[in-house]
Image (cartoon, helix red, strand yellow):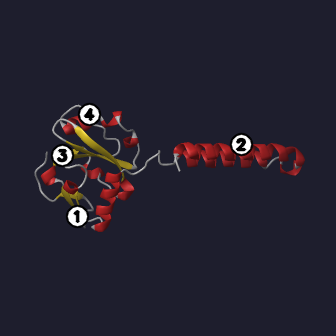
Amino acid sequence: MTVVSRFILSLQIVTTVLQSSTESKYAHAQYYNVMPMNRTLVLMLVSTLVACSDPAYVASATSEKISAELEESEYKSIDFAQLASSDWSQVCFFGPYNESSSEALGFGWNVGDHTDVLHSDGHNVIVFATESDVLEYVIHSRGRGDFSELSGECFTRDAASFVKDPDSGQWSAAVSPKA
């Protein structure tokens, strides 16, 4: 359900509650003191639901491939060289609150100009690029594979295979050279 449809549904619920409470306020005087509290409770609940919703995030085909490869390996390894287009030379990771993409990529491309998902804890942005251009960026839910510990780092295509340390749970490159 999108944010807009959640908002519309919330407005419908609030309108219904407010109308019914106004009508019943006069018809049922014994409930008069309870209704303002119910109205406040409903408004708080609806506000919380809207505020805590995932902002119109729909997983891309590449994000789905990442999730599928992680699931297949039981979240133990992933080879990004097999993902996305065949033309990229580096993959870069940006976790929550890290928008220093130009510095990491080595050329002018600001992730914040393309998405605002890094303003929350819920997503990573994975960027597939050449030495001078972004070919694809993927918004990937951290719940479906968390690469936030690689945030701000870029890896060459040859070094884009990662294994997860069973003790620390941290990703590390299976091959050491970096972009």
Mark 4 lies on residue? 109
Give residue 165's mark.
1
Q: Is residue 161 above or below residue 100?
A: below
Mark 3 lies on residue? 87
First-in-chain label (2 vs 4): 2
Gap between marks 3 and 1, in whole Å? 29 Å
Mark 2 lies on residue? 15
Q: Residue at left 89%, top 47%?
A: 27
First-in-chain label (2 vs 3): 2
Amino acid type, callout 2: Thr
Element at badge 1? Answer: loop
In the depicted view, which residue is nearer to us: 83 or 36?
A: 83
First-in-chain label (1 vs 4): 4
Element at badge 3? Answer: loop
**How far from the left and from the top, in percent, is residue 94?**
29, 45
Q: Residue at left 84%, top 47%?
A: 24
